């Protein structure tokens, strides 16, 4: 170590000692607050260990794993069609979207492609689950900041979307509808008209939330400039989805990659926000719900006729190989790395879920904020426990 | 509660019993009504749901079901709080006691009052802050970090908002020329605005700024959203109430809504003319000429005005997010207090000029 290094180190030690002396004299040694694993703000079992000085956070770290269910390992003892029943439960609010990348990866290995009608319906259901997921986020945002009313509007309007998903797939939360080579069934009668009216309702809901929350001065003062994540930091921590777009990175896998889905056939916009604060993240998600309703509306107009299932053998055996497919899920980039050795089930599956990476920025983002802002930042980062712990 | 009857014809124990029963009714009836009408029903309608519908017709017995539920629950003192178990158990009672102390000075009619203090509003503002002690005790003795944070936040907030509240009342006191709540009611109902006495002179017209400041401060004193940082259920679980269960939690709960009712009553006495309809309507000129039936109608009138004010308190509570601790302190010290000081100055100038 050079002289300068020594001097720096000595200065650092001296500063630490001075701090310690002040702390001992004033008896402000701080307090460790465990937020979670059981806490109303973490909607699940995330634990944030926060070291507080008064109400200010000096150090914070998330401790995940309280709800780990071992899906990566469990997939190894399942056949390919059985896996969708498991991975439904990763992001439980937008569960159909979890199935799609896995099925696409298996299809990629087998060299089959779903017929155009199936691709369209997949995209519609994908966007519907995004709407169901993010609309609940918009309502929950209010609860986290103390406004109880928006969440009931969110539950009311999400119900319409869940009814649609149930009508098409038979399951409200866990559709288990996607199959290798297509879909289990065609759309039910009346689905298209019903979806159009529901999309109108959802756009009204977005306006309502915008008026009730986003236009509220207290909400703005609670979110603007809170938890600012600059562009480069967001990229370094591997954020994805709306969290990344809110930091000004124009990145959306629905647009940026070519996969056999129907997003490239419709006209929509990727919203970004230059600020990178909590307000930006919430705002980008609000716009996303609006764009999703537009995508669904356009897809309903252009839905092609034909079968919903490609020709695949009764007993599915995926040829040897490795495939990676990721899609832009409601929470961010979700991908599956599937390794097959030619059996009925996968040899190894690596699940890249968005929340796990999004939450990794928490120690960085929480440093120096106040206790109420912890909740704001966590709410705006928007994670789902199943998506963190898998 | 006619003073004449009480002081001459009834024995001392009967007077006391009457006062205690009257106090219980004056605290519990508004609390129950507020919880049912606003917390159960209005909140539900605002959130596009029905609210309780099963217990009794239209869910009207839900309140009794809830009270029964809380009374059945075990009275838990956390192991860490055993050292101060007595203080821990005492805290909710202190909070409720401050509500009872408040209602003592509220006049319900020309003769329907508990005590007639010359410095009634001064007393009310003084005992209103006794609840801070209960909250601090609850926060500290719970031996819980969330409770501690909640208690400290509550103390900071309640002390900060005590000041604009007092300063807002000063305007009314200057205008009425008295601190006696009964006299303030009479001054409003028998008063006139530039000679026109059609509606008397309710001080909401002349002291509108003070009224707004007072209601904001009441909102903060009651720790209702947007000032519910001490409770903040999404961060501090339930603040200083986190460790309480059973009837001790119920007492906190009753205390919260009864205090909302009593503060709304005091606000309607200060700004809306209290128990009186304008005296000019009936040809009354002062307190002595008021007919006796006002002792029955007065409480109902006051109750109605209270419900109107609580409606606004609850409306704001259900529709706005909460301030951060530093933001609400800044709001009190940098905005409310200067405005209320200016209000006092302007009121004083007008008082001298006219």
Image (tube, coloured by chain):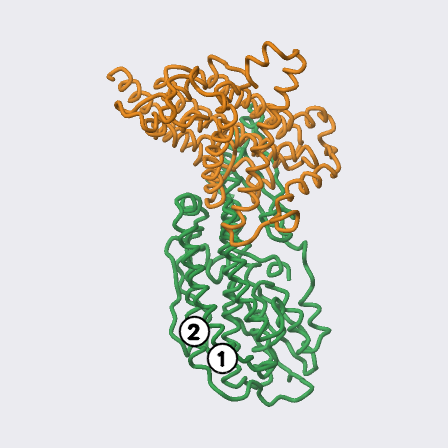
Chain colours: A green, B orange
Q: Position of residue A285 (x, y in %)?
A: 45, 59
* Label placed on residue A120: 1
Left-right relation of B69 to B281: right
On the image, the x and y values in percent for residue B37 come to: 54, 42
Residue A188, image quadrant: bottom right
In the rendered view, tell whether residue B146 sits above or below residue A96. above
The answer to whether A18 is drawn above or below residue A180 in the figure is: above
**Helix or strand or loop: what does disc 2 sit on?**
helix
Residue A5 location in percent, x, y? 49, 41
Horizontal side of B199 relative to A255 (left or right) equals left
| Residue B338 in sight from this viewpoint | no
Secondary structure under tag 1 reads helix
Residue at coordinates 53% horizontally, 27% vertically from top-left? Answer: B155
Q: Nearer the viewer, residue B82 or A10?
A: B82
> What is the chain letter for disc 2?
A
For residue A297, the mark is: 2
Disc 1 crowd rating (10 Å Cα; few below 14, some 14-19, many 20+) is: many
- Image position of B237 with respect to A250: above or below: above
Q: Are marks 1 and 2 on the same chain?
A: yes
Residue A388 position (above or below residue B239): below
**In the image, farthest residue toward the left:** B353
Of tags 1 and 2, which is closer to the observer? Answer: 2
Q: Nearer the viewer, residue B339 or B125?
A: B125
Residue at 51% x, 80% y is: A119
Which residue sits at x=46%, y=48%? A227
> What quarter of the picture does the N terminus of chain B occupy?
top right
The numbered mark 1 sits on a residue in which chain?
Answer: A
């Amino acid at each position: 170590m050079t002289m300068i290094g020594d001097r720096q180190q000595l200065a650092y030690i001296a500063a630490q000692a001075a701090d310690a002396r002040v702390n001992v004299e004033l008896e402000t040694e701080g307090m460790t607050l465990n937020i979670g694993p059981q806490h109303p703000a973490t909607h699940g079992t995330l634990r944030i260990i926060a070291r507080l000085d008064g109400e200010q956070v000096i150090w914070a770290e998330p401790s995940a794993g309280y709800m780990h269910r071992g899906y990566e390992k469990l997939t190894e003892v399942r056949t390919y069609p059985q896996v969708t029943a498991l991975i439904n439960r990763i992001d439980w609010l937008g569960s159909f979207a979890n199935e799609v990348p896995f099925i696409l990866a298996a299809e990629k290995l087998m060299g089959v492609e779903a017929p155009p009608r199936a691709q369209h319906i997949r995209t519609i259901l994908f966007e519907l689950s995004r709407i169901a997921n993010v609309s609940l986020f918009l309502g929950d945002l209010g609860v986290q900041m103390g406004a109880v009313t928006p969440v009931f509007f969110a539950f009311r309007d999400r119900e319409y979307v869940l009814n649609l998903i149930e009508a098409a797939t038979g399951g409200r939360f866990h559709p288990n509808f996607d199959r290798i080579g297509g879909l289990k069934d065609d759309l039910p009668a009346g689905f298209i008209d019903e979806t159009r009216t529901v999309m109108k309702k959802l756009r009204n809901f977005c306006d309502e939330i915008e008026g009730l929350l986003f236009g509220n001065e207290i909400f703005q003062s609670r979110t603007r400039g809170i938890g600012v994540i600059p562009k480069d930091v967001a990229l370094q921590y591997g954020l994805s989805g709306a969290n990344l777009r809110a930091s000004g990175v124009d990145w959306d896998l629905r647009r940026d990659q070519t996969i056999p889905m129907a997003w490239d056939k419709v006209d929509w916009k990727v919203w970004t926000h230059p600020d990178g604060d909590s307000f930006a993240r919430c705002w980008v998600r609000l716009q996303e719900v609006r764009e999703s309703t537009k995508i669904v509306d356009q897809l309903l107009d252009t839905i092609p006729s034909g079968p919903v299932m490609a020709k695949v053998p009764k007993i599915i055996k995926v040829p040897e190989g490795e495939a990676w497919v990721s899609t832009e899920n409601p929470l961010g980039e979700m991908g599956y790395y599937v390794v097959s050795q030619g059996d009925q089930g996968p040899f190894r599956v690596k699940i890249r879920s968005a929340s796990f990476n999004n939450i990794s920025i928490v120690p960085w983002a929480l440093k120096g904020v106040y206790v109420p802002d912890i909740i704001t930042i966590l709410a705006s980062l928007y994670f789902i426990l199943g998506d963190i712990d898998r | 509660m006619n003073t004449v009857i009480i002081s001459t014809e009834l024995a001392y124990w009967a007077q006391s019993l009457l006062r205690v029963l009257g106090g219980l009714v004056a605290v519990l009836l508004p609390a129950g009504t507020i919880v049912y009408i606003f917390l159960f029903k209005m909140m539900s309608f605002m959130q596009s749901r029905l609210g309780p519908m099963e217990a009794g017709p239209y869910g009207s017995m839900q309140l009794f079901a809830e009270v029964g539920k809380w009374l059945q629950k075990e009275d838990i003192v956390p192991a860490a709080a055993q050292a101060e178990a007595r203080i821990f158990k005492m805290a909710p009672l202190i909070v409720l006691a401050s509500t009872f102390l408040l209602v003592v000075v509220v006049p319900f009619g020309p003769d329907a009052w508990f005590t007639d203090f010359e410095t009634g509003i001064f007393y009310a503002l003084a005992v209103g802050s006794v609840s801070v002690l209960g909250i601090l005790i609850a926060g500290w003795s719970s031996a819980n970090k969330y409770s501690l944070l909640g208690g400290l936040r509550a103390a900071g907030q309640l002390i900060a908002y005590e000041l604009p509240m007092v300063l807002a009342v000063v305007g009314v006191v200057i205008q009425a020329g008295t601190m006696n709540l009964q006299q303030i009611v009479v001054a409003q109902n028998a008063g006139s605005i530039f000679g026109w006495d059609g509606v008397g002179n309710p001080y909401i017209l002349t002291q509108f700024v003070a009224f707004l400041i007072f209601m904001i401060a009441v909102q903060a004193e009651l720790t209702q959203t947007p000032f519910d940082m001490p409770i903040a259920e999404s961060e501090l679980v339930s603040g200083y109430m986190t460790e309480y269960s059973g009837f001790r939690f119920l007492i906190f709960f009753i205390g919260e809504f009864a205090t909302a009712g009593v503060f709304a009553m005091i606000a309607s006495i200060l700004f809306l003319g209290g128990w009186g309809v304008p005296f000019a309507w009936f040809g009354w000129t002062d307190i002595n000429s008021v007919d006796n039936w006002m002792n029955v109608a007065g409480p109902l009138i006051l109750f109605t005005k209270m419900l109107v004010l609580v409606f606004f308190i609850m409306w704001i509570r259900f529709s706005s997010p909460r301030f951060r601790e530093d933001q609400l302190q800044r709001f009190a010290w940098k905005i409310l207090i200067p405005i209320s000081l200016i209000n006092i100055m302007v009121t004083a100038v007008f008082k001298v000029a006219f």
